[in-house]
Amino acid sequence: MRHARRGYSRTCPRSPSRRTDNTTAVTRGAHHVGLTVPSLEESRRFFTETLGYEQVGEVPNYPAAFLTDGELMITLWQAADPDQATPFDRKNVIGLHHLALTVDADELEKLHSRLLDTKDVAIGFAPEPLMGGPTRHMMCNIPGGIRLEFIAPAA
């Protein structure tokens, strides 16, 4: 129960849920997530070759690449000067802490094995129950240092 050790097991929901307050939010989910990366080519390769995303566009002079898994678009931007860029530090820098992506339950262990063999991927923790429930998750840092969480909801 990794989250319980961090002290927010009672407040962190196990999965996205429907609103219960009978009001309607203005937004309808995420359209895309934009990530600045130190190496556009390494990040593009990770998403397409390791995770199976499809590249659906690019702007070479920006430079940026647009990738999708069929549900979510991820925009990758090349950092102007990667050597001078400050890596994210979740305790001291404001910004995206991590991106959580849903995977099928039967794919989580396979993905973990694949990530163990992927260059420049650091596993934060192996698949484990989320807050002791049937949903399982794992965390890693992908090439370039961005934190990804993979969540396999219980069926």
Image (spheres, rainbow, N blue to C red):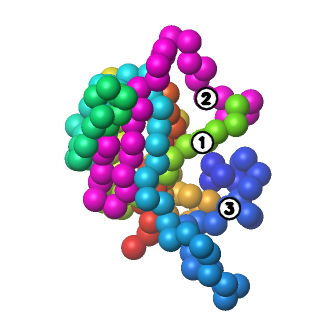
Sequence-wise first label, 3 or 2: 3
Q: In the visual, does 67 lie left or right of 126?
A: left
- Disc 2, disc 1: CB below 8 Å? yes
User: What residue is disc 1 on?
Assistant: 96
Going by the numbered disc 2, the residue's amino acid type is: Phe
Q: Quadrant of residue 69?
A: bottom left
Q: In the visual, does 4 lie left or right of 117?
A: right
Asked if residue 18 shows in the view, the reply is yes
Secondary structure of residue under mark 3? loop
Going by the numbered disc 1, the residue's amino acid type is: Leu
User: What residue is disc 2 on?
Assistant: 88
The percent position of residue 3, horizontal first and vertical second, equals 66, 52
Q: Is residue 53 above or below residue 26?
A: above
Q: In the visual, does 86 lie left or right of 58?
A: right
- Disc 3, disc 1: CB below 8 Å? no
Q: CA distance from mark 2 to mark 1?
A: 8 Å
Q: Is residue 102 above or below residue 117?
A: below
Q: Quadrant of residue 142?
A: top left
User: What residue is disc 3 on?
Assistant: 12
Secondary structure of residue under mark 1? loop
Question: Is residue 111 shown in magenta?
Answer: no
**Residue stretch in magenta:** 66-92
Q: Residue furthest top?
A: 83
**Residue at 56% from the left image edge and 58% from the top image edge:** 130
